[in-house]
Image (cartoon, rainbow, N blue to C red):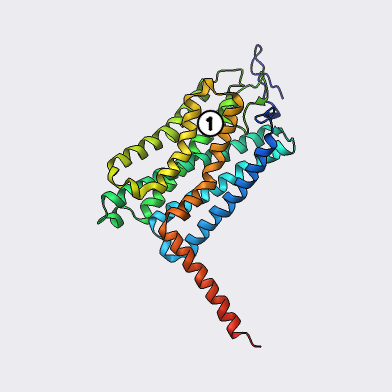
């Protein structure tokens, strides 16, 4: 629709957008098969971690509230992003309505932002545990962790709502083709014909708050506990998986081929939710012991039922 804003300007709000990120990439269907595998593994792995924490009362500490929230966020982000990307690409549903595109962006950006903020919460917990072992329970309570998680959720939602809201003021008279694999904020606002300065500012602010601040906090906190690096390999692996590919893309943006950039960013979005459960199951002794206890009790319960069953 094209309502007149004044006698010299026509405001164009497109009825739909076209997501064309993977079009033209050779042998891309093999990548989609890989995405299917990642999605299934992410759903199963994060669901397993959440189930173990719920069932085992010994994992009700503040640390595992943060781990549970990380698994929940990873599960939701995978469900929000990967099925839609596969639907767009495998079934050629490149057209997406204006409102659906903004909704898609809201959920993806909120949950991806929370992935970074969850790493801050886990880093805070680790630093407190190492630097103040005798006062850890006083300094890091359930209330403190839940308050941090609630604050970061509110921050992520607020940033995303502002970014999405500012997009609604843009006139899309240049093109409706989004050069990304989903409704990405940057490629979308660059399609605007009117002033995009507010959109640029909120995008830059989001980079500072969602990428630069978490990374600076995590690096600074681990500089304080450099002697305990060996006990933090799991969390450091999560940090590297999330931040390094994004930093690589932004630093070398001008010289990276567009296809390589799209593949790299899509991998950055879907790989952490798959790898986080593996890292926590393999690196965390408490979760491995909890799995053994739950499996043992399950087997014993079945044997007891079989023993009591009349012949």
- Count of marks, rendered view: 1
At x 53% / y 35%, what residue is drawn?
161
At x 66% / y 18%, what residue is drawn?
174
Mark 1 residue crowding within 10 angstroms, few (<14) / some (14–19) / many (20+): many
In this rendered view, identify the residue nearer to me: 69 or 262: 262
Q: Residue 99, located in which quarter of the rendered image? A: top right
Is residue 258 depicted above or below 124 in this figure?
above
x, y percent for residue 249: 51, 28
Query: Which quadrant, please, contains the C terminus?
Result: bottom right
In this rendered view, identify the residue nearer to me: 201 or 113: 113
Is residue 104 depicted above or below 308 in this figure?
above
Instruction: Provide the secondary structure element on which disc 1 rests.
Output: helix
x, y percent for residue 292: 48, 66
Along the horizontal axis of the image, is 296 left or right of 174?
A: left
Q: Residue 310, located in which quarter of the rendered image? A: bottom right
Is any atom of residue 125 visible in this view? no
Is any atom of residue 30 visible in this view? yes
In this rendered view, identify the residue nearer to me: 289 or 182: 289
Is residue 122 depicted above or below 286 in this figure?
above
x, y percent for residue 232: 36, 48
Location of mark 1 (residue): 163
x, y percent for residue 252: 49, 24
At x 35% / y 37%, what residue is drawn?
219
- The extreme top residue here reads 8
Query: Which quadrant, please, contains the N terminus?
Result: top right
Is residue 141 depicted above or below 170 in this figure?
below
């Amino acid at each position: 629709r094209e309502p007149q804003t004044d006698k010299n300007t026509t405001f164009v709000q497109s009825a739909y957008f076209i997501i064309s990120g993977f079009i033209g990439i050779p042998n891309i269907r093999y990548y989609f098969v890989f995405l299917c595998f990642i999605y299934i593994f992410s759903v199963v792995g994060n669901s397993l971690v959440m189930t173990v924490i719920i069932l085992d009362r010994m994992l009700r500490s503040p640390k595992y509230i943060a781990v549970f929230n990380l698994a929940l966020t990873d599960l939701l982000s995978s469900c929000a992003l990967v099925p839609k990307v596969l639907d767009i690409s495998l079934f050629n549903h490149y057209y997406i309505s204006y409102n659906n595109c903004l909704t898609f962006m809201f959920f993806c950006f909120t949950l991806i932002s929370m992935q970074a903020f969850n790493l801050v919460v886990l880093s805070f917990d680790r630093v407190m545990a190492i630097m103040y072992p005798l006062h850890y329970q006083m300094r890091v309570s359930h209330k403190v962790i839940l308050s941090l998680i609630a604050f970061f959720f509110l921050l992520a939602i607020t940033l995303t709502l502002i970014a999405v809201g500012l997009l609604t003021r843009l006139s899309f008279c240049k093109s409706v083709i989004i050069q990304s694999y989903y409704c990405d904020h940057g490629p979308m606002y660059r399609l605007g014909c009117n002033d995009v300065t507010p959109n640029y500012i909120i995008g830059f602010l989001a980079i500072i708050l969602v990428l630069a601040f978490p990374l600076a906090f995590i690096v600074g906190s681990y500089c304080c506990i450099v002697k305990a690096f060996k006990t933090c390999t799991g969390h450091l692996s999560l940090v590297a998986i999330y931040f390094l590919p994004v930093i690589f893309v932004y630093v070398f943006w001008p010289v990276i081929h567009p296809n390589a950039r799209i593949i790299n960013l899509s991998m950055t979005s879907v790989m952490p939710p798959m790898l986080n459960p593996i890292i926590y199951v393999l690196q965390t002794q408490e979760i491995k012991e909890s799995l053994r206890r739950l499996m043992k009790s399950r087997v014993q319960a079945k044997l007891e039922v079989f023993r009591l069953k009349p012949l």
